[in-house]
Amino acid sequence: MVTLTRPSIDQVWQWLDTIPDPEIPVITLVDLGIIRDVEWQDQVLVITVTPTYSGCPATSIINLDIETTLREKGVENLRLERRLSPAWTTDWLSDKGRAALEKYGIAPPEPAGGPRRCPHCGGDNLEKTSQFGSTPCKALWRCKDCLEPFDYFKCI
Amino acid sequence: MNRDQALFEFLLRMGDSTLILSHRISEWCGHAPVIEEDIALANTALDLIGQTQFWLELAGEVEGKGRTADNLAHLRDAWDFRNLLLVERPNGDFGKTLMRQFLFDVWQSLMLAKLKGSSDQRIADIAEKASKEVAYHVERSANTVISLGDGTEESHQRMQDALEDLYPYVGEMFIGDKVDEVLVKAGIAPDPASLRAEYDRIVGDVMYKATLQLPEDDFAHQGGKTGRHTEHLGYILADMQFLQRAYPGAEW
């Protein structure tokens, strides 16, 4: 019989920080800020997740990825819970995540409501093409310096 | 009517309206005039279907008969739907679709703002989440209505026709009944009529910028909230429910 020691909460957070967002694989679920809580309730590991957008199709994949990853690490009793409030906000994106987004070509969210600079050339001569981009969390912008289109991660 | 029965009806009104509107605008997927608009409508549909899941899941929970959001969406017939008649109106041209969207978005944003203070925490939570998404919907639909209304002679005329065609379906949003009475008393939801003044102010302002004339006649078609629908809903359901009807329990 194998006896598994219960992994610490910090350890679980570290594992969760290796799971990529299914739509934007350069950032992790922890970077995204959607993991709201990790705790042991008796012998069950409870992970509380909040959706980014109500209809985000990545939500079910995210839940599946969390479960798969933790089971691979030997966690047998786990439960995922959904928490709607407080509603997810782009303020919860980590600095590491924001930097990774920009490097990947997606302008990170800004309180001003639009991108600060083009993620390709750094230019600030920008225009909005559409309020909605390739996913509900992004808008479509264009840089008038390098003429490249790019996604902007919307502030919500 | 006890409180849970009223609550169930109210949740169906919220969830069925977002469900049917979501289905309607998803009909544009692959057909919108430009790709950005196509994507924007599909994204809006996605937000609305997500909100539908929350509302109908809670409806099933309140009803207590074990029905899931999917059961409610796919296995009821037209007379059990409680959506506003406005959202089942056919799409018409792109301008008309966005006019219908705008008339709905403004109401939905005002309703959600009130529901954020609901005495029922489950409702307040859904409203808090949904209102962030709806803020983007209403900004976009308002801008489009203004651009097309104050656009070419043809786009102006089409938007004026759309407004006249759809406006008689606006009044239903503000007509309260026994369901609302029970929920107002319990502090769960606002009196629908209390949203009217702000709605008129916002819509009036956008129509002014869009150079469009609001119809003076305030006649209101009603019935959607009590299950009396137009013939259009049956066609929507035939399309939307086909798979679950033909292959019960099918999943992917």
Image: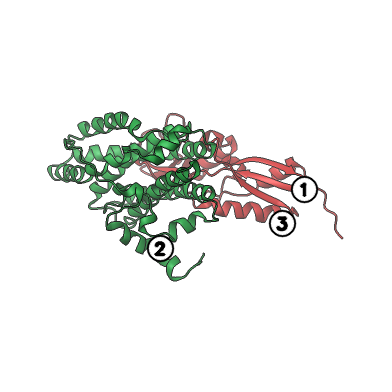
Specify the chain shown as red: A
Q: Which residue is the site of mark 3?
A: A72
Disc assigned to residue A43: 1
Verify CB contact (< 8 Å) between mark 1 and mark 3. Answer: no
Q: Are marks 2 and 1 on the same chain?
A: no
* Identity of the residue furthest to the left in this view: B153
The foreground one among A53 and A106 is A53
Q: CA distance from mark 1 to mark 3?
A: 17 Å
Residue at x 50%, y 36% (from the top left corner): B124
Can residue A68 be seen?
yes
Which structural element holds mark 3? helix
Furthest residue toward front = B1
Q: Residues within 10 Å of mark 3 (few under 14, many from 20)?
A: few
Residue A79 x, y percent position in the rendering: 67, 50
Q: Which tag, 1 or 3, sits closer to the chain's start?
A: 1
Query: Disc 2, disc 1: CB below 8 Å?
Result: no
- Helix, strand or loop status at disc 1: loop
Dot 2: element: helix
Q: Amino acid at mark 2?
A: Gln
**Tag 1: residue type?**
Gln
- In the visual, does A127 lie left or right of B168? right
What colour-coding does the image apply? by chain
In the displayed structure image, the side of residue B43 where residue A81 appears, left or right: right
For the N terminus of chain B, give its image quadrant: top left
> What residue occupies the far right of the structure in this picture?
A1
Q: Which one is in front, B44 or B222?
A: B222
Q: For mark 1, name the chain.
A: A
What x and y, as percent, mark residue A5?
A: 83, 49
| Residue visible at 53% across and 33% down in the picture | A91
Q: Position of residue A72 (x, y in %)?
A: 71, 56
Q: Which label was assigned to residue B241?
A: 2
Q: Nearer the viewer, mark 1 or mark 3?
A: 1
